[in-house]
Amino acid sequence: MITLVKDGVYLYNGQLMERGCAPVTVPAPHAGRENTMAYRILRAHDVGGDEKHLKVKFDSLTSHDITYVGILQTAKASGLTKFPVPYVLTNCHNSLCAVGGTLNEDDHAFGLSAVRKYGGIYVPAHQSVIHSYAREMSAFCGGMILGSDSHTRYGALGCMGVGEGGPELVKQLLSNTYDIAAPEVIAIYLEGTPKAGVGPQDVALSIIKATYANGFVKNKVMEFVGPGVAGLSVDYRCGIDVMTTETTCLSSIWLTDEKVAAYYANHGRAEAYAPLAPGEIAYYDGMVRVDLSAIEPMIALPFHPSNAYTIRELCENPYDILKATEDNCNKQIGNPNIRMCLTDKIENGRIKATQGVIAGCSGGIYENILEAAAIVRGGEVAKDYFSLNIYPASAPVNLALMQNGAYADLIRAGAVIKTAFCGPCFGAGDTPSNNGLSLRHTTRNFPNREGSKPGDGQSAAVALMDARSIAATAVNGGYLTPATEVEIPPYDSTYVYDGSIYEKTVYNCWGKAQPELPLKYGPNIADWPEMQPLSENLLLRIASVIHDDVTTTDELIPSGETSTYRSNPYKLSEFTLSRKDPGYVARAKDARAVEAARLSGDALPEAIVEMLSKVGADVKNTAFGSTIYANCPGDGSAREQAASCQRVLGGVGNIAHSYATKRYRSNLINWGIIPFVMDGDFTASDEDYIYIEGVRSALVEGKATVTGRILSTGEVIELQLKDITPDERDILLLGSLINYYAAASGR
């Protein structure tokens, strides 16, 4: 089904070239890599000229209403006068405005005022999810888009999308660059044709399962090639592509063909198409070989899309698989008073779910909903405790499904139709009942991603599936059923895009900045606190210790209703690690209070004075703060709040064996938090302090390591300052990206 090839491979005119059978002279790997689609696009956007280190400028930017206020506030504080490239603000995360009074709509009003002032594009609530609008209106072949959402992926349309934290968008807004080491490129070689009933989520989950845990494509570009691409519709390709984020890759790109040309023409943008293919001989650093005809309907059990099984094997051995998953989940939750229960979903040997959801940038695609409608036609999907909820990805998709009768089939069967909204994907819509099992064609199934609150004793589970198998399960009363086991009636997949909707609703002010206009502020929109430059020495309270294999950004700063406070750094920071380690905030605040006393010249607590005396440090050159230890933090969302909330609470450094994603590590640096790396076991507790001497000098001098001393035991640990670039060093020394830009402008 899927084979990983770790050694480099060559493609000759798009076909695999067997070793020793080259019809022409084979270039060296570094030269052959330049013939990939990825490198042709990267080089066209690189303004630095260094072959090994890229300085990229993107063609456009995109953000949603959990991230854009903070980005705009940061950019404004750093000297923003107008948007230098098209910047799209969508309102697809806090669309419901259901919690917090006026706060959500206040942010929307702020976004619209920023678009008018700086010259951008504003997409009102319920019109489109962020990535659907980008596919429909922003992507173009050979282009690059940077988004403040991790699922910024438009490779199937010939456009490289990169998801990053907000500060990276701030750099672009200030006409600076996105700096990365030249990435490796992995060929995703598709062969064969999927069976009826197998959808894009099934293919994606199979690839994620094969590549996530081993880091096969981590921080690399996935390039989709091979004869299997031609047999897939553009919607199908987009459905696979958007899930590449869950492999921890950097970006993705696909072959383009007449189907992509037709997509652009249908959306009124025929000029956006260009044929893309690798050069005559292209080199790849590895390959994922996928036989599409062998892919089966898949299900990803909690708590990660990589925890995937074929539905067939799960149904054949439900108890053992669910019991193992249940045990792993409860170990990760780490609270004996909150239990994840999965084995109780087995009824007479069959697994029964309580909810089905098809939504967002991965599930709400036109063809997914259309085929789900064909499966449920004439059936019944609302039985006992089971419900089926449908969220189209955009208003044009919504309209087309109304006009072709698909919604009539779904509604007659008992499904509930809603609007374009990302909520079910991050815990702000259709939260299931306690101990419920929700089957979702969305992007993630991390802990509490469905909206439950473990602090209130709540627990529920999300399993990821394709829309087709969700529909098959729905018509079978909620009993888990792969779509390959049901009849799929014929249906007309023709899609006619109606762009008049956006002409009436979207505020397109690109190139029409009106700097004299004011920004509209609501009471929840607050400026960032002042952040101090890095001191010579650090005394850090270890405010949380997490030994899970991976810690997600959702655990670092929970999503869902907490996102209402995303525009107020102080209020949002109160939720940091609230579901994983409820004591973290108080510990971090204690350390922050000591630093505030030091800066104001007040007397320090005796215990702190004693610690300083013990290590021979002086108050003037030793800053106080907090740190988090986690084995591998930062998987998941690009939301910068996972780092900025730590900084607001006084965080100055994180310690890890590795960082799960580049975007989280970048977020830490941009907020002035040093991403320390260590080998070996971390033995300290959240009652300990760690003293790091000479960290500022170490950064200035470009040293690779500093030493930290755990004060309770005297243990000395080596902390690596790994792969920190000169620009990153300067940001850390000045205390944040905001300070960095202020210094550059002389403010």
Image (spheres, rainbow, N blue to C red):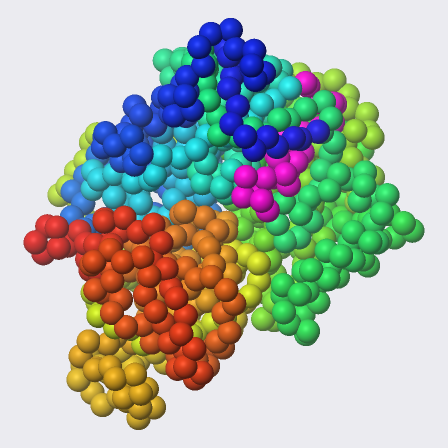
The correct choice, above or below, for 732 with respect to 296 in the image is: below
Q: Nearer the viewer, residue 597 or 697?
A: 697
Determine the residue located farthest toward the top in the rendered image.
23
Q: Nearer the viewer, residue 67 or 622?
A: 622
**From the image, which quarter does the C terminus lie in?**
bottom left
Q: Position of residue 138 (x, y in %)?
A: 38, 27
In which quarter of the view is residue 343 placed? bottom right
The total number of labels drawn is 0
Q: Position of residue 249 (x, y in %)?
A: 48, 39
The correct choice, above or below, for 46 with respect to 496 in the image is: below
Q: Is residue 428 visible?
A: no
Q: Position of residue 189 (x, y in %)?
A: 58, 23
Residue at 22 percent of width and 90 percent of height: 603
Q: Left or right: where does residue 556 sit relative to residue 346?
A: left
Q: Which residues are magenta?
A: 192-216
Residue at 21 percent of width and 82 percent of height: 619
Determine the residue located farthest toward the front in the rendered image.
20
Q: Left or right: where does residue 335 sit relative to residue 563?
A: right
As for residue 213 lying within the magenta part, the answer is yes
Q: Is residue 582 visible?
A: yes
The correct choice, above or below, for 717 with respect to 227 in the image is: below
Determine the residue located farthest toward the right in the rendered image.
348
Q: Left or right: where does residue 242 sit relative to residue 279?
A: right
Q: Position of residue 182 (x, y in %)?
A: 35, 34
